[in-house]
Image: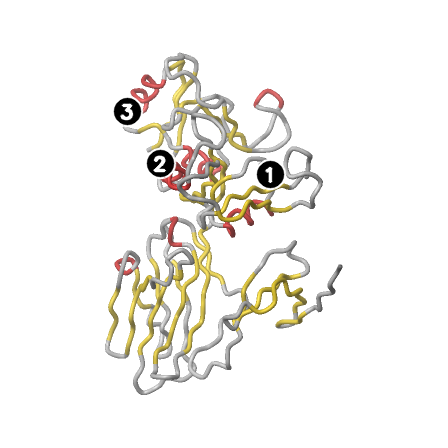
Amino acid sequence: MTSAWHTVVYNGTSYVPLLGFNGGGSFLMASENTLGRCRMFHKTKELQYLIEPPVYAEVTGRRGDNVTLPCLLKNKPKHYKVKWTKLDPEAMGVQNVVMMLSAQGYKPYGRLGPRATPRNAHAMDVSIQLHLLALEDGGRYRCELIDGIEDENVVITLSIEGLVFPYQSKHGRYRFTYHEAKEACAENDATLATFDQLYRAWTKGLDWCNAGWLHDGTAQYPIIQPRAVCGGGLQPGIRSYGPKDKKRDHFDAFCFTSLAPGSVFYVRGAFSYEQAQLACTKVGAELAAVGQLYSAWHFHQYDRCDGGWLRDGSVRFPISNPRRRCGGVSEAGVRSFGFPDKKAHLYGAYCYR
């Protein structure tokens, strides 16, 4: 039995509804030219006080940047407050309030509050500025005008510019619980990737056949070249095992990192792991984390054809200019030798300072 979907036109763009109405006044639909990516739009009455942001309103910044989350009034009620909240789908209804604004002043709240200030560009501006962006700052933010029963809100998405890399335990494939995967990413200067981050990585060429944990507790993996051992002959896309048991199920991890504030450099030698640590210490540095090496490769096109120890005990090297003697000519990336014996005197050291 087949069913025919009707195309929906929204702001001049054609969409195909995916799941109909969700019971909460919203419906899911995907653009016909976005390869199935889902976005949610809310049915709302016409805003009386707030200016509706552009469709897909999105702000992008790198780690360490300062950004503005825009929110503007077109009319100002006599008595009002504006509440800025970071929306967390895993918070189970708990609101992560960032700031409360009013004509009398403002008050910051929570983890983000100390790094947030009002922009105050003009009398109708209730935007906020976030300073020194961190990896975990990415997500959706709600600007809510509170005026009795006339409450209104707009939502802005903050995207941290960065990259996703797959990460596997030193003990082998599929060894992480959710919390172990989260900790492994943190130890490597990264966070567990969100679905949106994995999706963007897929559109830029990430093809990986092992399932990994994502921030939302699902296990998924991106496939560009369908093959029998990676989900069969289905269309290219992101394969999903759906939500999994965070304490019992085991997968790899997809980690997300952004621009690192320091620099990565190579110290030549034939070191054991312990000797590599000392070599970095002697020059006022420390062994680089995996995420820091990926950051140097991605943002600074770091290219080095020498295997070097990293902080987690793995040996890797970054290639921006693929060539036959450096892991092949197929594509750029960070090559890995896995986790060799730490007593082997075979590799140099990648240091971070």
Crowding at dot 3, Cα within 10 Å, few <14 / some 14-19 / many 20+, comes out as some
Callout 3–callout 2 Cβ contact below 8 Å:
no
Crowding at dot 2, Cα within 10 Å, few <14 / some 14-19 / many 20+, comes out as some
Question: x, y (%) of residue 187?
Answer: 35, 36
Question: x, y (%) of residue 321?
Answer: 58, 31
**Considering depth in this image, is 167 or 273 the residue closer to the camera?**
167
**Considering depth in this image, is 153 or 269 the residue closer to the camera?**
153
Q: CA distance from mark 3 to mark 1?
A: 36 Å
Q: Identify which residue is drawn at 64% across, 61% down.
A: 31
**Considering depth in this image, is 181 or 273 the residue closer to the camera?**
181
* First reached walking from the N terminus: tag 1 or tag 2: 2
The residue singled out by tag 1 in the image is 207
Describe the element under mark 3 as helix, strand or loop: helix
282 shown above or below 179: above
Question: x, y (%) of residue 230?
Answer: 63, 36
Crowding at dot 1, Cα within 10 Å, few <14 / some 14-19 / many 20+, comes out as some
Q: Identify which residue is drawn at 26% across, 64% down.
A: 108
Q: Nearer the viewer, mark 3 or mark 2?
A: 2
Q: Identify which residue is drawn at 48% across, 36% down.
A: 251
The residue singled out by tag 3 in the image is 281
Describe the element under mark 2 as helix, strand or loop: helix
- Residue type highlighted by circle 1: Asp
Q: Nearer the viewer, mark 3 or mark 1?
A: 1
Q: CA distance from mark 1 to mark 2?
A: 24 Å
The residue singled out by tag 2 in the image is 187
Describe the element under mark 1 as helix, strand or loop: loop
Asked whether, in this view, residue 150 is left or right of residue 18, the answer is left
* First reached walking from the N terminus: tag 3 or tag 1: 1
